[in-house]
Amino acid sequence: MCGGFTCSKNSLLALNILYVIVAFILFGVAAAANAASIVTSLSLVSGIIVCGVFLLIISIVGLIGASKHHQVLLFFYMIVLFIIFIIQFSVACACLAMNEQQQQTFARKGWEFSNNSTKRDAQKFFGCCGFEKYSKNMTDNMNHPSCVDIKNKNDQFCCGDPATADDATCCRGENSTACSCETCAEPIQESMVKGLNLVGGIGLFFSFTEIIGFLIAKQYRHQVDPRANIQSLLR
């Protein structure tokens, strides 16, 4: 960090302009990751979006405080920026540290709490049918929208000709062999993992710049404006 008043001021201004850009990147990427997984509404991703919004607000406060050397705004800026760092760092680490079992749980819960319209969108988007294969211990495979109009990755209908397909048995029964589509569990989880890794990596990287902003603001707040000293001498 630079030691002069002007250098600290310009560094803080430049850093807050960067924060504005980072804020748009954070909640833009997080929103895209959330939309890509379709059925998973993850609180972790939502946490990154919230951090992005607050970072945008506090960066504006930082720009005003740095340009005017406003002691109260700079103090408020330092406190909030440090809190954002803690939240963003924690959420980013949680995104990156999620194991496979936790990923499966999130994906399954997202599917279970989704309505049929969302499930239908997921099936069409991924070219899949139902969440998991039939199991006597699980009834979710029976609780999904019709797949007669769904096409798989090879552009084939899951249940054959939609005009003659039997929706009651296709992809729903224990002995069903008519379904040519895979289940949705794997593609949804893969999409979710990519989103979590992207959001977590970006959030973790930029969280360290917030510590730099905190230190520069602390240094700048305790520095004396040389122009104020000159004006006092002239008086």
Image (cartoon, rainbow, N blue to C red):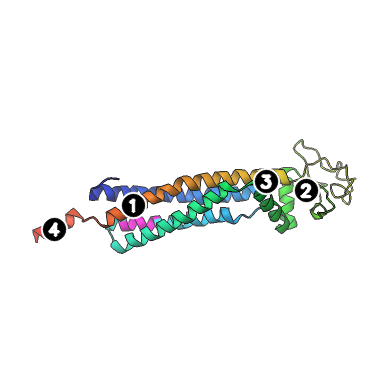
Task: State the SS at label 1.
Answer: helix
Which span of residues is magenta-colored? 59-65
Type of residue at label 1? Leu
> Within 10 angstroms of label 1, few (less than 14), some, or many (20 or more) residues?
some
Which tag, 4 or 3, sits closer to the chain's start? 3
Type of residue at label 4? Gln
Question: Which numbered disc covers residue 231?
Answer: 4
Question: Which numbered disc covers residue 215?
Answer: 1
Q: Farthest residue to the top: give it.
A: 154
Task: State the SS at label 2.
Answer: loop
- Left or right: 20 as drawn, with respect to 11: right
Name the residue beneath numbered marker 3: 189
Task: State the SS at label 3.
Answer: helix
Which tag, 3 or 2, sits closer to the chain's start? 2
Task: Name the dominant secondary structure of the magenta segment.
Answer: helix
Q: Residue 60, percent across and down?
A: 38, 56
Residue found 32% across the figure and 54% down from its top: 217
